[in-house]
Amino acid sequence: MEVTFSQLDDTVARFVLSEATHAFANTLRRAMISEVPTLAIENVRIYGNTSALFDEMLAHRLGLIPLKTDLSVHAPVDSCACGGEGCPGCTVIYTLSVEGPRTVYSGDLIPQDPEAVPVHDNIPVVKLVEGQKLVLEAQAVINKGKEHVKWQPTVACGYKNYPVITTSEECDGCGMCVEECPRGILAVDSGAVSVLDGRLADCSMCRLCEQACLSGGIGEEPGIRIAADETRFIFVVESDGSLPPSEIIKHALLYVKDKSHDLVGVLTEISGGIADEEGS
Ligand code: SF4
Ligand code: SF4
Ligand SMILES: [Zn+2]
């Protein structure tokens, strides 16, 4: 198995996974979405709320604010040494106190841990008019996306097969498929169609080029054929900013590795039991 990155920065990773199966690619995708822990607000104590929003709606909005997460500092609350009671190792406390007239933003949340700030400080929470006030204390904990979407570290995470484009000798270079391609990745060169250099991965496999060729009366088989490489996958992972994409990929791979070891252990136990039964 091989991974080749074409982009890796603080928010986006694009890479090609080669020599893999669909099952593995989808397992990795699901692990990145639902098995990588992040920090999110879980409990809110409201001391004063004279805004137009109910307490529950405010708590819901606060829960969806992405928070900077450092998994080397904070552990999931259910595996923390405090036994789930809440301590600085698994919980971050925020305070917020704002008086109108003005809009309350995510940046108004003051964290106990200065590293665990909201990813963006300009997310609107509620608009306060003259005389309205909001005072609260919020508790953020580490958990996983499989528990609630607010703990998902990704805003986009998906893959597609690597496209394979072939042309036949029937192609006369008429250019109809070139005009039809919505991605603009085809060109006619020396009387035959070809893919522009470095643009193959941009093919969406919509097959409009095949249809355009057939509509030109070429016969039963189009001059251009689109297929999918079943062992290569193009991934795009976009983080919500709580964790960098490199961390999301690393933790997802570690999760898959751990689960694979668990599965091997269980299968070994079962096959050992069957062998014992057959031997007795
Ligand atoms: S593949 Fe078909 S549509 Fe495209 S240039 Fe060749 S003959 Fe024309
Ligand atoms: S499948 Fe779609 S995107 Fe790909 S080359 Fe054909 S028309 Fe272009
Ligand atoms: Zn704890």
Image: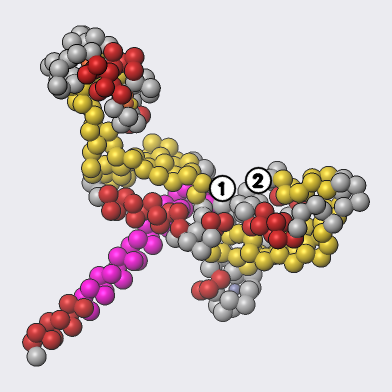
Residue type, label 2: His
Q: Is residue 92 left or right of residue 52?
A: left
Q: Are marks 1 and 2 in contact (CB under 8 Å)?
A: yes
Q: Is residue 277 above or below residue 93?
A: below
Q: Nearer the viewer, residue 142 or 244?
A: 142
**Number of numbered callouts drawn:** 2
Q: Quadrant of the C terminus?
A: bottom left
The residue that label 2 is drawn on is 120
Q: Is residue 145 left or right of residue 220?
A: right
* View quadrant of ligand 1: top left
Measured as percent of width and height from the top left, residue 199 is found at: 33, 25
Residue at x-position 31% and y-position 71%: 262
Q: Of marks 1 and 2, which one's residue comes earlier in the chain?
A: 2
Residue type, label 1: Gly
Q: Is residue 184 above or below residue 136?
A: above
- Whether 97 is among the magenta residues is no
Measured as percent of width and height from the top left, residue 195 is found at: 27, 21
* Label 2 Cα neighbours within 10 Å, binned few <14 / some 14-19 / many ≥20: some
The residue that label 1 is drawn on is 241
Measured as percent of width and height from the top left, residue 192 is found at: 20, 13
Q: Which residues are magenta?
A: 243-269
Q: CA distance from mark 1 to mark 2?
A: 8 Å
Measured as percent of width and height from the top left, residue 148 is found at: 53, 60
The secondary structure type at the circle numbered 1 is loop
Residue at x-position 76% and y-position 54%: 53
